[in-house]
Amino acid sequence: MSATGIRLHAPAPGWSLDADLVVVGSGVAGLTAALRCSAAGLRTVVVTKARLDDGSTRWAQGGIAAALGEGDTPEQHLDDTLVAGVGLCDEAAVRTLVTEGPDAVRRLIETGAHFDTGPEGAIELTREGGHHRRRIAHAGGDATGAEISRALVEAVRARGIPTVENALVLDLLTDADGRTAGVSLHVMGEGQHDGVGAVHAPAVVLATGGMGQVFAATTNPSVSTGDGVALALRAGAEVSDLEFVQFHPTVLFLGADAEGQQPLVSEAVRGEGAHLVDADGVRFMVGQHELAELAPRDIVAKGITRRMQEQGTDHMYLDARHFGAHMWENRFPTILAACRAHGIDPVTEPIPVAPAAHYASGGVRTDPHGRTTVPGLYACGEVACTGVHGANRLASNSLLEGLVYAERIAADIAAQHAENALHARVPA
């Protein structure tokens, strides 16, 4: 029920599917959960609002953070995450993330994801804001999310997991005891199903991504409209930390009136040595933080905003001309193409940038196994609030969180399913 007392009602479902669980969303979190549950023998259905690869995952440029490099440890990764979270992280959740993260990345590689490697075959690691070590694995230079999405979508199709695309989930279905019983949804495009339908399942995994489209300027794709949080709230689930929306400091500035999804200029560009400067070429982040341009995102975004206010302008610049054409073309081909498409050549001129809405650090509150406060309803990825990010997400922890907590959810659902099957076989 909304604050106005008005609630829109959809028609009764005209078609239905039965499953052991339904995954809502098809990014790194949703597809990982689906693959792990399917591998455990569970009847799994994936529903997604557009196509399987249309979520935020494929737009991730920087990479995935994990303590994979020589000399790096989960403890160091934990320290950097806690600092970025400004004292509001759940330390136990972060410890789970950084401890289970390296093996989760290795399993992602086994699933088919290919990361960039050096001459000797080791994964190349780069550095981003808030990290004191090189621990970011990337693919295609700056196309990590696209590679992860490709690998997971191919794996889901290879397993024959049923998928329903172009489907907007409407509401959680519950049984007489208030437990999860599936979802109702509206298929809005061509496909096997059409119109309002339902997927009946005792477990639902919300992996619907973020809500960046609530803001005028965002890095998020058009599908990131907060549907999962809205569904959870209507179902009575608790949400937490929704005020912690992270703004990415360096988004390609397209003009003061630009709206919708804006091209991201990855933090990895600064990690490789690009400088933030004003119109006079002054590096204004130097002296504001020990890491200068590589300070945590909230600090850099505030530094840019402060400088813009001081100078009465609406953007700053990211200067990476010293990279040269070869490095731009090989390390950051996606960003180079995006900039050139908008008439800017980073090889010969600084890139105009400004902060824009990027990531929801809060969301549907979950426990260490991804369970929400509604029995049978789980959440992972950007829609969830695991406590990992606190008030500000550490760069490239998002893909890792999706991986780690999706695997934990799959393990919990499989265990619950096995226990229920055992009870069903044992006479009362």
Image (cartoon, grey):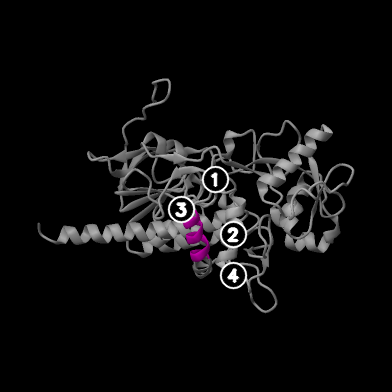
Q: Which of 148 and 68 is in front in this view?
A: 68
The kind of residue tagged 4 is Leu
In the rendered structure, the answer to whether residue 316 lies left or right of residue 115 reads right
Principal secondary structure, stretch drawn in magenta: helix
Q: How far apart are marks 4 and 2 (CA)?
A: 16 Å
Residue underneath mark 3: 30
Residue underneath mark 2: 79
Residue at point 67%, 65% (across, down): 134
Task: Specify whether residue 153 is in view.
Answer: no
Q: Nearer the viewer, mark 3 or mark 1?
A: 1
The kind of residue tagged 3 is Gly
Q: Nearer the viewer, mark 4 or mark 2?
A: 2
Disc 1 element? loop
Which mark is drawn over residue 68? 4
Residue underneath mark 1: 361
The tag earlier along the polypeptide, 1 or 2, is 2
Q: Distance between the residues labelled 1 and 4?
A: 24 Å
Question: Which part of the image, by quadrant, shows the N terminus?
Answer: top left
Depicted 190 relative to depicted 21: above or below? above
The tag earlier along the polypeptide, 3 or 2, is 3
Q: Distance between the residues labelled 3 and 1?
A: 17 Å
The kind of residue tagged 1 is Ser
Task: Specify whether residue 401 is in view.
Answer: yes
